[in-house]
Image (spheres, rainbow, N blue to C red):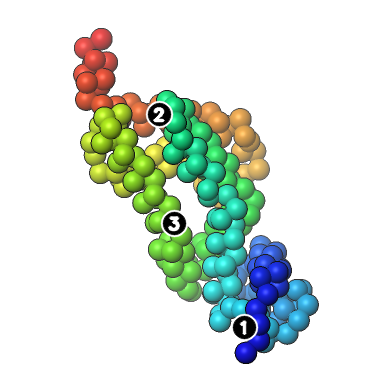
Amino acid sequence: MRLKSPKRRQAIIEAAAGMFRERGFDRASMHAIAARVGGSKGTLYNYFPSKEELFFAVVEDALEAQAAAPFDALGGRGDLHARLEQFARLYVEFRLGDDVIALDRILIAESERTNLAGTMHERYVQPQWRRLAEALKAEMDAGRLRPADPYRAATQFRLLAEGDLVERRLRGDRSVSSEMAAGEVSEGLEAFLRAYAPEAEADGREAA
């Protein structure tokens, strides 16, 4: 059995990431990826049993590099508004990045032929939003947000933070800027906090 090198594995992932971005999933063959990284197709299969698993390794590599920072910000100390805003800014910045948008476009293109999108959602997307739901539930339990379904609250928070910016980037709109993202996050967060304000705060605003 051939020994696997972490350095070699990472080189394969990086070569595959570039190939998937350039050619899409269907036209990025294992043979072409092997040629780019330098080696045989058999070597790739020694590390990854299929092209699908190599693609998911690319996804995981991208997520590991970026996903920790937003949750670190959310789990810190301080005002809830500030923590949620920092989380949303970091998340939207990551979500609008060229590499993530390229992966999304691949998933959309493959959605009629394969279950790549469904598998990615189950493996990588749902766990992240469950993690946010757990954080929001802790805030609900502490009385800083009103009690509600935490997973639904996490989904609504994501949509309010993103606005229409991700959709625009997917369509190729390059006018989306960091300033626009900051404005969307700020307005979306205000809407979220109005919707999930503790009952006493909501009643106070209505009385005023």
Residue 175's quadrant in the figure? top right
Whole-percent x, y for residue 190 in the image: 40, 26
Q: Nearer the viewer, mark 2 or mark 3?
A: 2
Checking the image for residue 125, the label placed there is 3
Circle 2 crowding by C-alpha within 10 Å: few under 14, some 14–19, many from 20: some
The answer to whether the residues at label 2 and label 3 have Cβ atoms under 8 Å apart is: no
Checking the image for residue 127, the label placed there is none
Q: Quadrant of the C terminus?
A: top left
Direction from residue 10 to residue 79 in the image, left or right? left
Secondary structure type for disc 1: helix
Whole-percent x, y for residue 60 in the image: 55, 62
Residue 36's quadrant in the figure? bottom right
Q: Name the N-terminal-most of marks 1 and 2.
A: 1
Mark 3 and mark 1: span between their CA atoms?
26 Å
Task: Please give the residue where the numbered disc 2 appears in the rendered image.
Answer: 80
Q: Please tell me whether residue 106 is drawn above or below residue 34 in the rendered image.
A: above
Q: Name the N-terminal-most of marks 3 and 1.
A: 1
**Residue 111 vs residue 100, the one in the foreground:** 100
Task: Please give the residue where the numbered disc 1 appears in the rendered image.
Answer: 45
Amino acid on which the number 2 mark rests in the picture: Leu
Amino acid on which the number 3 mark rests in the picture: Val
Amino acid on which the number 1 mark rests in the picture: Tyr
